[in-house]
Image (spheres, rainbow, N blue to C red):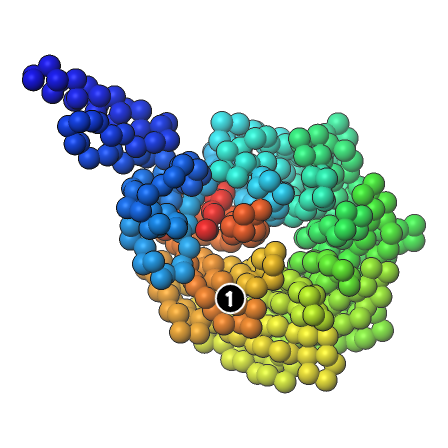
Amino acid sequence: MKISTLCIWVVILLCFKGLPTLGQSVTINPSGISPLTPRLSNEAILALPNPQTGDLAYDLTFLCLRVYNGSEWLCSYQDPDNIVPDMALLATTGGTGGSSPNGMATDAVGNIYITGYFSGNATFDNISKTALGYDDIFIAKYNKNGKVLWVQTAGGTSEEHGRDIALDENGNLYITGSFNGTTTFGSTNKTSAGGTDIFIAKYDTSGAFKWVRTFGSTGNDVGNSITVYNNTNIYTAGYFNGEVNFEESPSTSNGGSDIFLLKCTPAGNSVWVQTAGGSGNDQALDVYAESSGAGITGYFYGTASFGTEARISAGGTDMFFAIYNHEGDMNILQTAGGPGADAGQSLAILSFFGSNYYVTGYFSGTATFADKTATSSGGRDIFMAIYTSSFSDPLQLLKTAGGSSDDQGEKIIMNEIGNNFYVAGKFSRAFSIDNLNKSSNYDSNIFIAQFYMNGHINWLKTASSSNVIEVQDVAIDAADNLLVTGYFFNSARFGNFRKTSAGNSDTFLLKLK
């Protein structure tokens, strides 16, 4: 009897030791000992064969005990009727300096690609990189579970930033951003014309460098956003100062920085460029392309010309969005604003039954959006606007959110089937959207919200930092999970996860499902 009991305990201890890697529970017969609870990744739990109602498993991805209810694995603290998703911290990147992601994209099998910049030494999982100068560009590929597959860098002795990334259907990567001085991309050296210059670079899915094109003047020129449509149309948007040769003939800004939208081929050859602006500083911050053309959003100051149309800001900077067909003709222009600072930060287009245009950003004080007026609660407030292509009644919906401090929408994206859209941004201390209220003990917080296409909010999630936390980009993977990337200083809280930055700013990657 004693020997039998001892054997049972030996088996139990061996099972506990092996639980992190075993994808199964353990039953000991005929003693009737209860099944042990395995500790598995979320992916391994979902792959368990023939789960039974009441089965338990500890989720190492989302840090919760899950119970199988007969149809799905629910977190033990989760109401079966609760629609708010779980949040997982897939990865962080940090080192002696700082790192900041700026753009993110996913491929058809769930791999994740992020570009941004880092300084000093940075560790991406088990891959370490050292910047050549102050800031260097990085491009990192992760699998769907957040494991780093490869990292490529580009840089020189000055500041080089990756601003955005896009993929074509073959898995090729297109990066845009800015560089200063002499910078090495793969085996190619490029030297800026004066200040920062725009670059567009292409890499294949394994990270091999293909080509780089640069555009610049003696002033500062930056590529802020890039997108690919139909595998053949590469659109880049940003701003430039002075005279820049985007094509054979130069484009010249009207005063300060001007807006540009550049169309290129997959080989990097310019097809056409459209510019807009006036004597003030004007920028395109985001570009989005679909079947009818390409859209850009950003801000302008003073009097600005968009093709044959001139617009005057109401006081400070005003928000704009403009839609161009694939030949470069502008079809739609909308502006909004008031005496304060207003900007469009991100744009998405839905074109199932006619075209609807979804824009998020920020406004200050009282701002006018078509036939509607909104007043901020304090400093900057978040806006989400849905426009149509109608000239007589263009604004379908305006929704605002905010508190007594500065809050702003940073990114907007819609899922593949077009029944939900997501907005991510930042808030200070407290804010509300519709009937959902959020408060924090910290000044720096981020939010992620899901909306139905009619603008009704579905759920709201937040994360906080004791110093600074920012959302930089969002993406939706092949399994319809929402991915969020950004950076944080010092300690940060992401749902059940706590993390402290290794140096200055650290990059984070979240998954919500």
Residue at 59% across / 36% down in the picture?
A: 141
Up/down of 186 relative to 417, above or below: above
Residue at 48% across / 66% down in the picture?
A: 407
Residue 12: quarter of image: top left
Frontmost residue, 470 versus 269 = 269
Residue at 29% across / 53% down in the picture?
A: 77
Q: Pick out the residue farthest to the left.
A: 1
Tell me the residue that label 1 is attached to. Answer: 451
Q: Pick out the residue farthest to the right.
A: 248
In the image, taking residue 98 as reference, residue 221 lies left or right, namely right
Frontmost residue, 64 versus 240 = 64
Up/down of 203 relative to 408, above or below: above
On the question of residue 280 being in view, the answer is no
**How packed is label 1: few (under 14 Cα within 10 Å), some, or many (20 or more)?**
some
Image quadrant where one finds the N terminus: top left
Frontmost residue, 42 versus 473 = 42
On the question of residue 68 being in view, the answer is yes
Q: Pick out the residue farthest to the front.
A: 30
Q: Amino acid at mark 1?
A: Phe
Up/down of 79 relative to 391, above or below: above
Check disc 1 and report its element: helix, strand or loop: strand
Query: Can you give x and y, in whole percent of width and height, for residue 366 in the image?
Result: 55, 80
